[in-house]
């Protein structure tokens, strides 16, 4: 099984990216994991430029999604919405369909950001992705120092919770989708957030 991770933050010290990196270390033993770090290379989406052959960065992004059995997304909220780079990346695969029926897990590095959670849920469901509610997790990293983030991500409790969310995601990927698919995925915030010390 191959998992692909997308961070909505381009910051070098992004808490969302840190969370995805930690997830990569704790993915099930039989799963490979790749953090896709190149969404900033995608041109601004324009349907007029969605031609064949595709722009190299677009082709790379689509191929990465195609090869993934499941996609993990962690994103900050910008102005009550999805950061432009991530929304742009998602727009490039609306018509080409790489996310159709693709299992997606949403991770969050902050308990804030209800708007981005709702927006990502709406966007991904519109794109016919398969959002896996039980593979949603919040780890409150925002506002912490780099050392505090490292410590929190190394805590046995955090690692156990993250591991079990990833296992749950892997199980959902392996299981066939449930027939009542639409209504099941309307509540993206199911797993309780990990409590700070
Ligand atoms: C331009 C900008 C807009 C933001 N807007 C919001 C917002 O609307 N709501 C919110 O909760 N946080 C907002 N924030 C705070 C970010 O969500 C927060 O810094 C984020 O967790 C950073 O994630 P990262 O560490 O992965 O980069 C904003 C930050 C920036 C830079």
Image (spheres, rainbow, N blue to C red):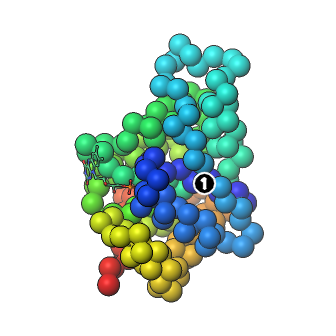
Number of on-image labels: 1
Q: Which residue is mark 1?
A: 35
State the residue at coordinates (42%, 75%).
Answer: 147
Looking at this view, name the residue that lies furthest to the top: 48
Q: Say if 71 sits above or below 193 in the image.
A: above
Res. 104 in view: no
Position of the C terminus, as image quadrant, is: bottom left
Task: Tell which of 153 and 67 is nearer to you.
Answer: 153
State the residue at coordinates (32%, 49%).
Answer: 77
Position of the N terminus, as image quadrant, is: bottom right
Q: Say if 65 sits above or below 139 in the image.
A: above
Task: Tell which of 9 and 103 is nearer to you.
Answer: 9
Q: Residue 86: percent from the left, percent from the top?
A: 46, 41
Residue 12 falls left or right of residue 176: left
Q: Residue 173: percent from the left, percent from the top?
A: 64, 60
CA neighbours of label 1 inside 10 A, class few (<14), some (14 to 19), many (20+): some
Res. 87 in view: yes
Residue 134 falls left or right of residue 25: left
State the residue at coordinates (67%, 72%).
Answer: 28
State the residue at coordinates (47%, 53%).
Answer: 12
Q: Say if 141 sits above or below 75 in the image.
A: below
Q: Residue 157: percent from the left, percent from the top?
A: 47, 85
- Find residue 125 and report its image quarter: top left
**Cβ at disc 1 under 8 Å from ligand 1:** no
């Amino acid at each position: 099984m191959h998992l692909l991770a997308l961070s909505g933050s381009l910051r070098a010290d992004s808490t969302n990216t840190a969370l995805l990196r930690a997830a990569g270390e704790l993915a099930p033993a039989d799963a490979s994991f790749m953090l896709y770090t190149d969404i900033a290379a995608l041109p601004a989406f324009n349907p007029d430029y969605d031609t064949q052959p595709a722009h190299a960065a677009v082709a790379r992004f689509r191929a990465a999604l195609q090869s993934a059995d499941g996609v993990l997304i962690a994103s900050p909220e910008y102005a009550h919405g999805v950061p432009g780079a991530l929304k742009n990346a998602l727009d490039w695969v609306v018509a080409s369909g790489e996310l159709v029926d693709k299992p997606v897990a949403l991770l969050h590095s902050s308990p804030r950001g209800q708007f981005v959670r709702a927006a990502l849920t709406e966007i991904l469901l519109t794109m016919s992705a398969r959002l896996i509610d039980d593979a949603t997790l919040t780890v409150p990293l925002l506002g912490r120092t780099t050392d505090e983030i490292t410590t929190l991500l190394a805590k046995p409790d955090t690692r156990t919770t993250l591991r079990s969310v990833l296992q749950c995601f892997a199980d959902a990927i392996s299981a066939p989708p449930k027939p009542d698919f639409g209504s099941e995925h309307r509540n993206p915030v199911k797993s309780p957030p990990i409590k700070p010390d």
